[in-house]
Image (tube, helix red, strand yellow):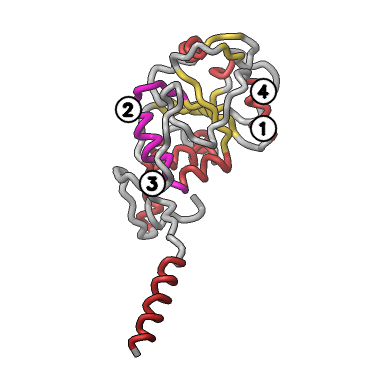
């Protein structure tokens, strides 16, 4: 009998080890990002800009995605929170990567960039032109941009948000843009209030200050 108990114990340990780890897509469980040589956080899905925004835009449109520019700088505490909390939540990353093509610009960068109007500026000059005063700033370009646009990307911007938002707001900002919520309701907070009421009516608990998304967030979002 003792021998059988040993065998059963071994089998139990094997089964426990073979049990898949549950992927909590609402929690920050992705690996902690590392810094690159410029002290900016590495994310495998952030595209390397071609430094010609016309080509970046063309590549995004070929992939049937919206072009997004995330403006950052080194030693940015809000950028740190965005990468170490929000962008470690699988559902947030999936929402972004399935629908948006993301490039990054440094507001103090000195690389030469060709704007979509053909003008050549450094990253820092492009930031000034677009009145990028805070980091992170996430800048969404409009869909189906054809030909030169007066003012460059500043004239093709559909929406932007500045600073750090907790995961609930951050996730729904991308959902807001994806579904063109700004066309029917230019005020994001009012639009999000409707989402909150819908969740409440369906008895779905959420905490706008949590470092996680609601665990039971419906698939429609």
Residue drawn at (37%, 85%) of the image: 3
| Residue range highlighted in magenta | 71-90
Q: Pick whichever of labels 3 and 2 is earlier in the sequence.
A: 3
Q: Which residue is mark 2?
A: 77
Determine the secondary structure under disc 2: helix
Residue 95 x %, y %: 51, 44
Q: Is residue 219 above or below residue 94?
A: below
**N-term mark: 4 or 2:** 4
Task: Describe residue 108's horizontal placement relative to residue 5 as left or right.
Answer: right
Badge nearest the viewer, 3 or 4: 3
- Looking at the rendered structure, the secondary structure element under dot 1 is helix
Mark closer to the chain start, 2 or 1: 1
Label 4 neighbourhood size at 10 Å, few (<14), some (14-19), many (20+)? some
Label 3: state its secondary structure: loop
Q: Nearer the viewer, residue 102 or 190?
A: 102
Q: Earlier in the sequence, mark 3 or mark 1?
A: 3
Residue that mark 3 sits on: 28
Q: Main secondary structure of the magenta part?
A: helix
Label 1 crowd (10 A; few <14 / some 14-19 / many >=20): some
> Is residue 191 visible from the viewing direction of this image?
no
Q: Nearer the viewer, mark 2 or mark 1?
A: 2
């Amino acid at each position: 009998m003792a021998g059988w108990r040993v065998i059963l114990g071994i089998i139990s340990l094997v089964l426990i080890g073979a049990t898949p780890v549950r992927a909590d897509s609402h929690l920050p469980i992705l690996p902690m990002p590392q810094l690159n040589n410029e002290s900016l956080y590495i994310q495998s899905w952030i595209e390397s800009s071609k430094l010609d925004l016309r080509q970046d835009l063309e590549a995004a449109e070929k992939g049937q995605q919206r072009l997004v520019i995330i403006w950052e700088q080194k030693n940015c505490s809000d950028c740190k929170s965005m990468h170490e909390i929000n962008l470690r939540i699988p559902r947030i990353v999936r929402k972004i990567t399935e629908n948006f093509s993301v490039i990054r610009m440094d507001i103090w960068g000195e690389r030469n960039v060709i704007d979509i109007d053909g003008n050549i500026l450094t990253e820092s000059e492009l930031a000034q032109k677009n009145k990028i005063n805070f980091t992170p700033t996430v800048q969404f370009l409009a869909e189906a941009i054809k030909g030169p646009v007066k003012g460059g990307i500043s004239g093709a911007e559909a929406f932007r948000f500045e600073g750090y938002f907790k995961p609930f707001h951050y996730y729904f900002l991308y959902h807001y843009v994806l579904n063109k919520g700004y066309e029917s309701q230019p005020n994001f907070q009012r639009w999000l209030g409707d989402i909150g009421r819908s969740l409440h009516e369906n008895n779905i608990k959420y905490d706008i200050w949590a470092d996680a998304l609601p665990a039971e967030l419906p698939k429609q979002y």
